[in-house]
Amino acid sequence: GVAGEISSSDVDKLSKFFPPCMLNLHQALMEKSHLKHSGRMQYGLFLKGIGLKLQEALIFWKSSFSKHVNEQKFNKDYAYNIRHNYGVEGRRSNYSPYSCAKIIVGFGFGGNSDDVHGCPFKTFSPNRLKQFLNAASSYGGAQVTDPDSKISDIVALAKSKHYQVACTRFLEMQINSRLANKDAPSTTNHPKQAAGKPNSDSVT
Ligand code: SF4
């Protein structure tokens, strides 16, 4: 492919390097073959930010939704919003990925059980966060040494509202275990994202 671009078929492979908020959305999308509007915005703009171009985004979302949504319905109900996010419809604004600050504040977060957008370090209960991070730590074959105590520390940070610090610790844990297992990300555009910076401007 072209440098800095990813194709629809790369997304699943790359998801093991995603920050938890995006991995959560990706897994929900794969499992349910659907995401609500806020989730599509948060995840769709992130995918755009890591190099998924419009045509590939349309392929990715169409195939991800295909269990419940046929092509005609997809084109009618969903394609416009995707094109809109890429600035080819409506006001033609060039939308950027949401920052952690915006995601954490919880745009449109209704607390419904089927809301999967937002920042898991904030929205998940400590137990759920622990389970999720445990699963995420081994997702894609990463082998973390002593994950339980590391994850307990991370959950404690989240509990005391240090969401971004908790996220950074988690991503460092993943990166270190991958480096130790020689499974570091090989695409050049990705480590930046795997460092938990959907929008590098707003992360401090
Ligand atoms: Fe996503 Fe930022 Fe939350 Fe990490 S801290 S899970 S990158 S919103």
Image: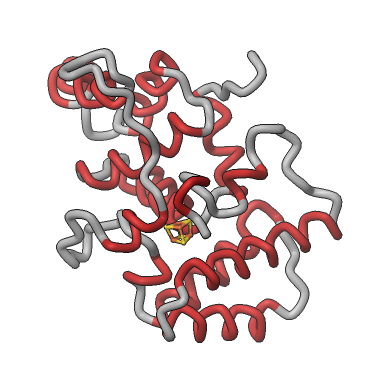
> At 77% across and 62% down in the image, what residue appears?
176
> At 55% across and 44% down in the image, what residue appears?
15
Out of 181 and 185, give the one closest to the viewer.
Answer: 185
Out of 90 and 113, give the one closest to the viewer.
Answer: 90
Does residue 61 sit above or below 136 in this rendering?
Answer: above
Residue 70: tell me if it is visible.
Answer: no
Q: Residue 117's spot in the image, x, y percent?
A: 30, 54
Tell how many labels.
Answer: 0
Q: Residue 158's spot in the image, x, y percent?
A: 46, 78
Residue 104: tell me if it is visible.
Answer: yes
Asked whether, in this view, residue 194 is left or right of residue 98, the answer is right
> At 64% across and 14% down in the image, what residue appears?
2
Asked whether, in this view, residue 129 is left or right of residue 18, the answer is left
Q: Residue 24's spot in the image, x, y percent?
A: 42, 55
Q: How is the image coloured?
A: secondary structure
Q: Residue 91's spot in the image, x, y percent?
A: 17, 19
Quadrant in the picture for the N terminus? top right
> At 68% across and 77% down in the image, what residue appears?
147
Asked whether, in this view, residue 102 is left or right of residue 132, the answer is left
Which quarter of the figure has residue 135?
A: bottom right
Asked whether, in this view, residue 119 is left or right of residue 77, the answer is right
Does residue 63 sit above or below 105 in this rendering?
Answer: above
